[in-house]
Image (cartoon, helix red, strand yellow):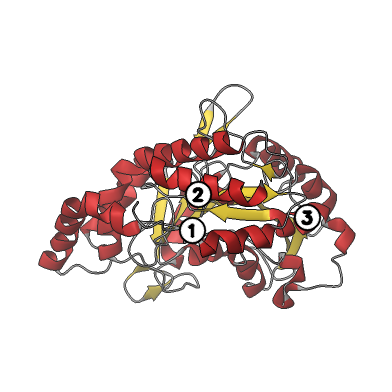
Amino acid sequence: MKKIQMVDLKSQYEKIKDSVNVSIQEVLDTNTYINGPQVHQFQKSLEEYLDVKHVIPCANGTDALQIAMMGLDLKPGDEVITADFTFAATVEVIALLQLTPVLVDVDMFNMNISIEGIKKAITPKTKAIVPVHLFGRAANMEAIMAIAKEYNLYVIEDNAQAIGANCKFSDGTKKKAGTIGHVGATSFFPSKNLGCYGDGGAIFTNDDALAHKLRGIVNHGMYERYHHDVVGVNSRLDSIQAAVLNAKLPLLDEYSKARQDAARKYSIAFEGHKNIVAPSICSICDCHVFHQYTLRIIDADRNGLMQHLLDKGIPCAIYYPIPLHSQKAYSDSRYKEENFPITNQLVTEVLSLPMHTELDDEQIKFITDSVLEYLG
């Protein structure tokens, strides 16, 4: 059996190396390393794939979130609601811009931000909501947009983990995660579902005026060289990373299907086990692209299972072991433990198994057999 990886980028590269190498060579031949033709090609291809008017490439996913907030003219002290159970980048950029983060609990079923939690957290100072499409599952954007409309709030989608996922609305329509709010942000970190070979990110919007402002912010506030019209940053997707993404983007739906197929096999193996709550997978399964395949281990030793798997050469991880409200950098007297019952439970139960496009049946069986061996 091939060695199991948490994310097997090497095997993925072997299948696409010719197209990746050709794309990178074009950059080397033209010497257009910053904002070259490969970047513009990727921008247009991603706009078409997402069915969104504007894609603004940038240097990384954290910058994408920060720049999105800068473009909305949020002011110091404005309150921004986001989920307590996620990676720190989401709250990090809120704090960096001297906005006030308001952390709320998540939903036990999908681990995304609680709709009731959002409603309870709104105050006269609230200006924006940042839903995170966690682990690849789309948040309830229909409900979130309804709340935003009622209270005149911005919605900034953190889509770093769910590019390619669909959000389905009650009228039967579907839109890609990241394209529904006023602005969306994503990351192309190598381990992402659509990853480059370094850092990269992008911002999405259907708002022409906002897109214009964002394009200036990513480039030192310039629309014309040496004319700085807005306060900006230096955050540009380099051409070599765009070259890699150009080779991968046509395969994104294929990659999503491979992850969904692997997730389905995992969940079938764990079905009905008293100590395992596996992700639910519908027959279509297009609302979840499984950036992570995350179990909840209940009434059993989660940490013991993790060590058992590691001892057998099976990588696994806890995303995330410490809630944001408990992190030293973001602790605040406003936060009470009783306000985060779901998050506080999840951090003791979650365990993510290997998930990537190259998992094969032999590996999946070894992983699932090893989990069941420990839990009985």
Q: Report whether 157 appears left or right of 229.
A: right
* Viewer can see residue 163: no
Q: Say which label, 3 or 2, has the lower sequence index.
A: 3
Q: Position of residue 292 (x, y in %)?
A: 53, 51
Residue 59 vertical position relative to residue 7 in the rendered view, above or below: below
- Dot 2 corresponds to which residue? 367
Q: N-terminal of the two: label 2 or label 1?
A: 1
Please report contact status of discs 2 and 1: CB closer than 8 Å, yes or no. Answer: yes
Q: Three-letter amino acid code at disc 1? A: Ile
Q: Position of residue 202 (x, y in %)?
A: 43, 57
Kind of residue sitting beneath label 3: Gln
SS at circle 1: loop
Image point 23% across, 54% down: which residue? Answer: 14
Classify mark 2: helix, strand or loop: helix
Q: Residue at x 56, y 41 (%)?
A: 180
Q: CA distance from mark 2 to mark 1?
A: 7 Å
Question: How busy is the neighbourhood of tag 3: few (under 14 within 10 Å), some, or many (20 plus)?
Answer: few
Instruction: Give the residue furthest to the top.
Output: 171
- Identify residue for label 1: 314
User: Dot 2, how many residues are within 10 Å of its Cα: few (below 14), some (14-19), or many (20+)?
Assistant: many
Instruction: Name above or below for residue 278 compared with residue 233.
Output: above
| Mark 2: amino acid | Ile
Horizontally, is 237 left or right of 134 in the view?
left
**Res 53 quadrant in image:** top left
What residue is pinned by disc 3? 345
Q: Nearer the viewer, mark 3 or mark 1?
A: 1
Earlier along the polypeptide chain: callout 3 or callout 1? Answer: 1
The percent coordinates of residue 375 (x first, y second) are: 66, 49
